[in-house]
Amino acid sequence: MGGKLTLIFDVDGVIIDSNSVHTEAWRIYLKRLGRETDGLLRRMHGRRNDQLVRDFVGGELTPAEIFRHGAEKERLYRELMAPQLQQRLVPGVGRFLERCRHAPKGVASNAEPANVAFVLDGSGLRHHFDAIVDGHQVSRPKPHPEVFLRAAELLGAPAAECIVFEDSPAGLAAARAAGARTVAVNSARVQLDGADLVVADFLDPGLEQWLRRQNFSLSD
């Protein structure tokens, strides 16, 4: 393995193609509450759960109410995702992680801790990661760079020596603010500007070519 770069991955949209399932879970949950659901994906992409509850549920909510609404929606998400989790892994992610086995790797996500654990354990990919930072381990969510700076710190690398794999404008902004190099995984087919590289998934031949230019070689 050439180079000393460290890899950091978001979860939703990068490891697992989950955005449509999150949208459906919110649609079902908000319908139960009698709330409108127009433009859900546009409003939710890359944001933390407490922000979404305030936006979608509305009203003067206490911290306990925000937690309860978020937890109920996430339980619904996991119920919907469980039977299709393996099929929704972003193409090539498992093999890519295996080919990067000699590089330090971490997770940095705005997601709820239970969802991060659900995806990493359910997919069998947890063992690839040396550090995991979820949305409850930092005080400022993306687009603030805190989550990536914390992951880089745990991995023992300066952010400038990290490559971040992200799928949202907020996540890319956070990674750039941290000083990391960025790969946009466009699983949600949204407009992603400002990344050093944009790929459809981990099977994209342009990814390995770009990594070589960063002096990072994949194992066979």
Image (tube, helix red, strand yellow):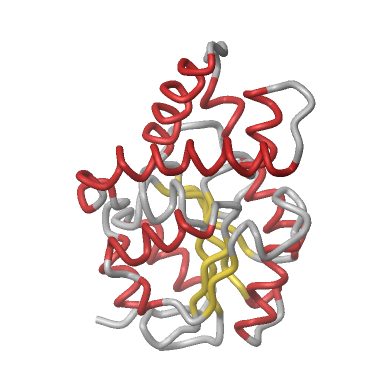
Q: x and y percent of residue 185 in the render? A: 45, 49
**Quadrant housing residue 20:** top left
User: Left or right of 169: which side holds 101?
Assistant: left
Q: What residue is drawn where x is 71% and y is 54%?
A: 174
Number of marks in the rendered image = 0
Report the residue at 48% width, 36% height from top.
73
Residue 192's x, y, as percent?
Answer: 57, 38
Where does the image place residue 140, in percent across and percent down from the top left? Answer: 77, 54
Q: Quadrant of the N terminus?
A: bottom left
19 versus 174 height, above or below: above
Task: Residue at 71%, 80% (x, y): give it.
Answer: 158
Q: Nearer the viewer, residue 217 or 69?
A: 69
**Is residue 102 left or right of 33 when viewed as pictured?**
left
Instruction: Examine the image and state in which quarter residue 220 appears.
Output: bottom left
Residue 42 spot, x, y in % from top left: 57, 25
Of residues 168 and 121, the one nearer the viewer is: 121
Q: Is residue 47 above or below residue 175?
A: above
